[in-house]
Image: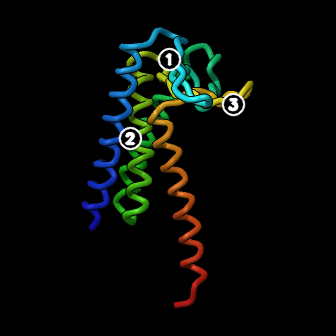
Amino acid sequence: MIQSQVKLGWWIAGVVLILDQASKFAILATFDTYERLNLLPVFDLVLVFNTGAAFSFLAEFGGAQRWIFLAIALLAVVLIHRWLKDARPFVAISLGLILGGAIGNGIDRAWQGAVTDFLLVYYQDWYFPAFNLADCAITLGAIGMIIDAFQEFRRERTPT
């Protein structure tokens, strides 16, 4: 059982990593920096680079953030791998999503010093910061972990 959850998590992470890196490669090969392609009235593809964390947090930190965030990603990989050993299947899937996203963005930081973002959602003058498939996977994994926490709370409160 333990091995299967670890395998499931790493399999999900591998799929996320392949999709993330392939999409970034395609964007990097096709777009110039800040070039935009409108696909829907509220959605564009655009090539931007984020040297910070979520929402460009610490982007102006002078370059040290590259190594700080890379170290955090490596630590996350180790901790998630250990966590997978005791995970239920739903949690293993959620952790696999987070793991794949962390590795995908970590590769970007190691390779080019910034994360490649290319998905842009907006409405009129409001813009959500550009993001990528790794960010989507991390977000979905985090939502899964929150759902599991609520389910665990309910399981603990339900008499058997």
Identify residue type, mark 2: Gly
User: Which of the marked residues, 2 or 1, is nearer the chain's N terminus?
Assistant: 1
Crowding at dot 3, Cα within 10 Å, few <14 / some 14-19 / many 20+, comes out as few
C-alpha distance separating marks 2 and 3: 29 Å
Residue 155 found in image quarter: bottom right
Tell me the kind of residue under disc 1.
Leu
Query: In this image, 103 relative to 146: left or right?
Result: left
Instruction: State the image quarter where residue 83 is shown.
Output: bottom left
Foreground pick, 127 / 107:
127
Mark 1, other Cα within 10 Å: few <14 / some 14–19 / many ≥20: many
Residue positioned 37% across, 53% down in the render: 82
Residue that mark 1 sits on = 47
Sequence-first disc among 2 and 3: 2
Closer to us: 33 or 80: 33
Q: Is residue 89 left or right of residue 69?
A: left
Label 3, secondary structure: give it: strand
**Image quarter (top left, top right, bottom left or bottom right) of the N terminus:** bottom left
Q: Which residue is mark 2?
A: 100
**Residue 123: which numbered mark, if any?**
3
Q: Residue at x 53, y 45 (%)?
A: 139
Q: Position of residue 150 (x, y in %)?
A: 59, 67
Looking at the image, is mark 1 or mark 3 earlier in the sequence? 1
